Image (tube, rainbow, N blue to C red):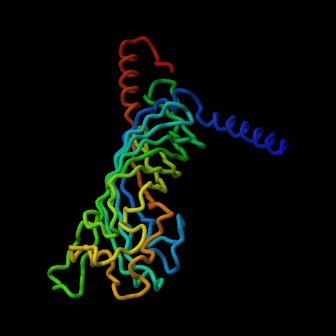
């Protein structure tokens, strides 16, 4: 055991020593201290509804439901405070959806539940930059200043905390009701399982990403994030089927159990998995604008105009 710890310590020190060399100097990483991020992406829900062609698998990529892919828009502000670390505050608007009809697993398909949700999420996260290559070329074509190419690559992992507001809806398509009355209805007020819940929940995002510099001012990158929530009701499904007689609203009665008459889905039987909270995935393309380098360039230009000499950092 002691030998393993010594080996781990040695490898960690070696990694950190080689990693520090990649940041080159204080000048290079500090010129990207403040950044504005704009992104678009795709989402996948991981909960009680929909899924693949087998019995549900908690927190598994095998249970992805490709027809239920949603869209996301991202706005963030990133502050880098150390060669290895940065923090990001973000706002994300996105939709989630799932439908049992998309699953080829017989029981799931027969359950016939569905949902969609528009979501607003704020996050505060911290990034660990585990690999980077950041070098800046010449800023001005001054005499004796050789032209150099820019290098701006980062690979990082992140985690943090978030808060999400969700507005889940289900499609009301009772075959005993005229088609023109079929519509999307808000699920939370219906209390389809006889329980009330809040439309807010905390989240824990974790993920990995990379970004590559296109110029001194712009970078482009990709992120893959897994977001764990503390709610099991984003899809309005969690515990067991309620008794239909407990509903005074016929829409609520139908949305609680579209497969009424099927003994598998009788009152008191399992409707969802209350032991596992809902989660979702993000895959985002993020464009980053450097807010620090512009200020640095102005200062450097002003310094040279005064005739003091070359700006040194």
Occupied quadrant, residue 307: top left
Question: Residue 4: x, y in percent?
Answer: 81, 45
Screen quadrant of the N terminus: top right
Tell which of 143 and 50 is nearer to you: 50
In the rendered image of this protein, does residue 39 appear above or below residue 293? below
Question: Residue at 51% across / 34% down in the picture?
Answer: 136
Residue 32 location (% of width, % of height) = 45, 34
Could you tell me which residue is drawn at 42 percent across and 61 percent down?
232
Judge whether 100 appears above or below 232 on screen: below
Residue 116 in sight: yes
Rendered view: 255 above or below 199: below
**Above or below, 69 relative to 180:** above
Where residue 54 sits: x, y (%)? 52, 79
Q: Nearer the viewer, residue 133 or 162?
A: 162
Q: Residue at x 64, y 38 (%)?
A: 19
Q: Is residue 18 left or right of residue 179?
A: right
How many marks the image carries: the answer is 0
Q: Please report the residue visible at 40 percent of the width from the left and 26 percent of the height from the top.
A: 296
Foreground: 233 or 301? Answer: 233
Q: Position of residue 242 (x, y in %)?
A: 35, 74
Q: Which of the pair 26/162 is nearer the observer?
A: 162
Q: Is residue 66 visible?
A: no
């Amino acid at each position: 055991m002691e030998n393993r710890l010594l080996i781990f310590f040695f490898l960690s020190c070696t990694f950190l020593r080689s990693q520090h060399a990649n940041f080159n100097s204080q000048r290079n990483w500090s010129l990207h201290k403040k950044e504005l991020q704009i992104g678009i992406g795709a989402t996948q829900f991981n909960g009680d509804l929909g899924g693949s062609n087998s019995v549900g698998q908690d927190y598994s990529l095998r249970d992805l439901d490709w027809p239920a892919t949603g869209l996301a828009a991202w706005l963030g502000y990133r502050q880098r405070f150390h060669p290895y670390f940065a923090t990001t505050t973000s706002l994300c608007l996105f939709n989630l959806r799932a439908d049992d009809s998309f699953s080829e697993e017989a029981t799931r398909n027969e359950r016939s539940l569905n949902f969609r949700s528009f979501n607003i999420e704020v996050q505060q996260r911290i990034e660990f930059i585990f690999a980077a290559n950041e070098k800046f070329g010449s800023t001005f074509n001054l005499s004796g200043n050789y032209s150099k190419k820019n290098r701006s690559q980062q690979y990082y992992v992140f985690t943090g905390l978030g808060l999400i507001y969700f507005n889940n809806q289900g499609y009301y398509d009772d075959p005993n009701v005229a088609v023109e009355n079929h519509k999307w209805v808000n699920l939370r007020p219906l209390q389809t399982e006889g329980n009330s819940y809040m439309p807010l929940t905390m989240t824990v995002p974790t993920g990995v990403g990379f970004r590559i510099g296109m110029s001194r001012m712009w970078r482009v990158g990709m992120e893959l994030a897994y977001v764990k929530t503390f709610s099991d009701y984003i899809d309005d499904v969690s515990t067991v089927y309620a008794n239909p007689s407990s509903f005074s609203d016929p829409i609520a009665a139908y949305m609680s159990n579209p497969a009424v008459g099927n003994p598998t889905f009788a009152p008191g039987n399992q409707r969802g998995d209350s032991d596992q909270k809902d989660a979702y995935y993000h895959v985002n393309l993020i464009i980053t604008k450097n807010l620090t380098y512009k200020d640095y360039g102005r200062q450097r230009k002003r310094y040279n105009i005064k005739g003091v000499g070359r700006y040194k950092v």
